[in-house]
Amino acid sequence: MAKVKFLVGSTYGNAEQVADDAADQLANLGHQTQVYNRPTIDDVIAKDTEVLIICSATIGEGEIPDNLLPLYSQLRDQFPILAHVRYGVIALGDSSYDNFYDAGRQMDELMQELRAEAVQDMLVIDACETPDPEEAVSEWISALHLKI
């Protein structure tokens, strides 16, 4: 089974709750999980990093939340090649805003630039269409489990 690190970008706690639930689901399937609410570059480049799941809300006009922004900046500045890392992205947002899942999109693009391997397509959760994201996340995590 895989060691899965959840990197959370959350302002009001929704993304944190989604990450906690997803981590619990994967742990129940036999994976080793850890949730990082203030992730650092050391958490990402550690030798034990196998799978990263970035679970982020979007704030303002498409910005990355304050607790995830330092990691994003560190990764852009230091640009570590992560070819040995597999990843996935869960992007939360509200489609009544133009850039409603941009934080997730930006993190996904950065992971691709760092040559990490996407395990599956990004899950976009729109608060306008999915008031309770548990079912969507559960299905996405079940599919992820089969790939890691």
Image (cartoon, rainbow, N blue to C red):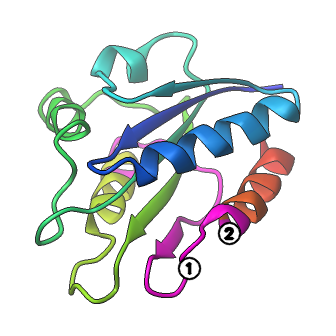
The reply to whether residue 117 is visible in this rendering is no
Q: Is residue 68 above or below residue 132?
A: above
Nearer to me, 17 or 120:
17
Q: Position of residue 124 (x, y in %)?
A: 50, 72
Mark 1 residue crowding within 10 angstroms, few (<14) / some (14–19) / many (20+): some
Label located before the other in sequence (1 or 2): 1
Residue at image mark 2: 136
With 15 as the anchor, is 21 left or right in this view? right
Could you say whether the residue bearing mark 1 is in a helix, strand or loop? loop
Residue at image mark 1: 130
Q: Quadrant of residue 48?
A: top right
Q: Residue at x 22, y 79 (%)?
A: 99
Q: Position of residue 70 (x, y in %)?
A: 16, 32
Disc 1 marks which amino acid? Thr
Q: Residue at x 34, y 58 (%)?
A: 57
| Magenta residues (range) | 112-136
Mark 1 touching mark 2, by CB under 8 A?
A: yes
Could you say whether the residue bearing mark 2 is in a helix, strand or loop? helix
Q: Quadrant of residue 74?
A: top left
Quadrant showing the C terminus: top right
Q: Which marked residue is nearer to the observer: mark 1 or mark 2?
A: 1
Q: Is residue 41 above or below residue 71?
A: above
Disc 2 marks which amino acid? Ala
